[in-house]
Image: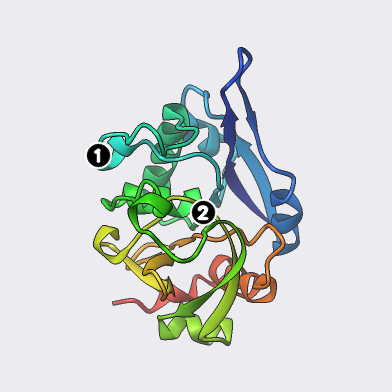
Amino acid sequence: MMRVAVTISIHQHTDQPRDFLQHTYVPYLEPLGLIPILVPNIIADPVAYVRALDVQGFVLTGGGDVAPERYGEADSGTETESISPARDSTEYHLLEFAVERSLPVVGICRGMQMINVFFGGSLIQDIPSQLRSPIRHDGNPSHALAITDARFAQVLQADRIEVNSFHHQGVTADRLAPELDSFALSEIDGVIEGVAHQRCPVLGVQWHPERPTPSRETDLRLLRHFLKEGAFWQNHP
């Protein structure tokens, strides 16, 4: 079993803010041999916390938007949702720790976006208004992706997959961090839905593998291969 630090969302539109995690994550992670360790967003030193618990990997979960200031843009004001500086800061510190120690990181939805921003990329703040995509990414039952990296196509045993979709922000080629490679693409509108770091064991997917999805079997294959073997980075030059 592998202990993984799992970041969590903040419900802050109340006089009693609270951290929370949707119930879909734990039943998804446990069969993968992972012991989820939840990381509070207001803890004074998140790095000391995960070090004391001897975590061996990280899962950055979905949730509200990353603050645009993190990637050098002004907040559009009308389209961003549930921004939490506390969560942004917690995840930044954890990513620094993970990268420094070559610990595996998996980012889901917002988690993938945070990975992109951390490594110097930026985000489309609102796909419907800025990209005019014919695909409804926020709440769409499913849509097709092309697997554009041969390594991932081999692991997934597919060059196209159907995924769920629950996001209104996203990454395109012109906003992708220099150290990240895309491996999954929504070809119709150019939204990148899977990224991997070129040297570090860092992986991000824009869809939600922990929720009902037509890609469940390929998702499990990808995560098992990544977490238990680290095969994408073992022989990297």
Judge whether 29 appears above or below 65 on screen: below
- Which residue has dot 2 on it? 109
Please give the residue where the numbered disc 1 appears in the rendered image. Answer: 73
Q: Is residue 68 above or below residue 184?
A: above
Element under disc 2: loop
User: Residue extending furthest top?
Assistant: 15
Q: Mark 2 vs mark 1: give the one in front.
A: 1
Q: From mark 2 to mark 1, how far is it between C-alphas?
A: 20 Å
User: Of the residues shown, which amino acid type is indicated by label 1?
Assistant: Glu
For image coordinates 51% across by 87% down, the residue present is: 154
For label 1, the crowd category at 10 Å Cα-Cα, with few meaning under 14, some 14 to 19 and many 20 or more, is few
Pick the front one: 52 or 157: 157
> Which residue corresponds to the image point at 41% horizontal and 47% vertical from the top-left?
114
Residue drawn at x 47%, y 80% as measured from the top left:
146
Residue 11 in picture, x, y percent from top left: 60, 28
Sequence-first disc among 2 and 1: 1
Left or right side of 226 for 179 = left
* Residue 221 x %, y %: 63, 75
Q: Is residue 26 left or right of residue 113?
A: right
| Residue 210 in view, yes or no | yes
Residue 129 spot, x, y in % from top left: 38, 50
Q: Is the residue 144 above or below the residue 204 in the image?
A: below
Residue 177 visible to an observer of this rendering: no
Q: Is residue 55 left or right of residue 177?
A: right
Quarter location, residue 180: bottom left
State left or right for residue 28 relative to residue 179.
right
> 110 or 107, which is in the foreground?
110
Q: How many marks?
A: 2
Q: Residues within 10 Å of mark 2 (few under 14, many from 20)?
A: many
